[in-house]
Amino acid sequence: MTKPENSLSRRNLLVGTAGALTLATLSDGGFSSADAAAPLQGASTPTHHRFKLGSFEITTINDGAVQLDGPHPIFGQNVEAKEVQDLAVKNFLPPTRMEIGFTPVIVNTGKELILFDTGNGDRNRPKTGMLAAGLAQAGLSVEQIDKVVITHAHPDHISGLIEGGKPIFPNAQYFMSTAEYDFWSPKDKLTGKTERVAKLVQSKVVPLVDKFTFIKNEQSVASGITALDAFGHTPGHTIFHIESEGKRLMLMADTVNHFVASLQRPDWHVRFDMDKAQAGATRKRLFDMLAKDRIAFAGYHMPFPALGFIEKSDGPSYRYIPVSYQFSV
Ligand SMILES: [Zn+2]
């Protein structure tokens, strides 16, 4: 009686065959290209993702990603580590390691090319600072950028403004919220808890100040693109509502920093949020709005291409639904 083949025995068989091939190749001395194993290429990284929003064209650009210990205590500072680890595992994520990406967004309105945030630039963080290279891959150049809009002044958003003392986007006008600039730019912020970011603002933003327009809630940076206060992450953190021919997209910036923790546990304290309670309230207010109006969003730290929808569950808790073909059908 023959034993029925199960998947395990078939797997063993395949491994055995591969082993035999390797041995044959090694003992052969020379071998033809047909016999050679394909070289390993290393993991691949997407550079950009483009889609249409009404008459606008939107490109998300991959500035890179870093790996860190976490999510706890970066996320869930106010709860036990185990609670955060359990949520990670439940969502098929490793409990104690995480990756966080950086995704600037470019909107081509047909009249202007507008970049939102500038990535890590020359911060010396391995595997980041790829915005300029990503632009080239997307068929765009730094010279073509007409406007640069900064959502807030954290290093992963402003470091790509100036590198080696030179502005990276030579033909751009710049925009940032008044509240954000007014918080970080005074000299008394150059010591204490605000020192690191305030110093960076002095070297990356202040030299360009004559080219900056400082904006307030509901002010437009271009036709169809409106600033909205989303304070808490920083004192002037600003998001942008984009609308073209009835199609809408919210650029949520750092309202949402982790696609599981920020959505499913919006009240968890996040290390990066300067005012934890205000950031949590802002998250819930905006998540409710996006869920109710079924608006897609781009999140600077969402998994690339950093586009999704928000579904409301009980709790308050929400679920991240990555964009698939909604913009192409
Ligand atoms: Zn950020």
Image: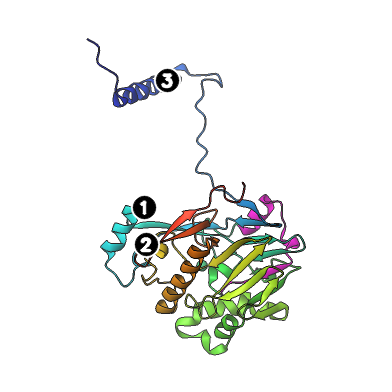
Q: Is residue 181 above or below residue 261?
A: below
Q: For the residues marked 3 and 1, what is the alpha-carbon distance in whole angstroms?
A: 36 Å
In this rendering, the count of numbered labels is: 3
Residue 24, percent from left and from top = 42, 18
Quarter of the picture containing the N terminus is top left
- Label 2: few (<14), some (14–19) or many (≥20) C-alpha neighbours in 10 Å: many
Residue 30, percent from left and from top = 52, 19
Q: Which residues are magenta?
A: 131-152
Q: Is residue 54 above or below residue 157?
A: above
Residue 198, percent from left and from top = 54, 80
Q: Nearer the viewer, residue 212 or 59?
A: 59
Q: Label 1 belongs to which residue?
A: 93
Give the mark nearest the N terminus, 3 or 1: 3
Q: Label 2 belongs to which residue?
A: 71
**Does the magenta run of residues contain 138?**
yes
Q: Which mark is residue 21?
A: 3
Q: Please name the amino acid that badge 3 sits on.
A: Leu
Residue 133 shows up from this direction: no
Disc 2 element? loop
Give the mark nearest the N terminus, 3 or 2: 3
Q: Are marks 2 and 1 in contact (CB under 8 Å)?
A: yes
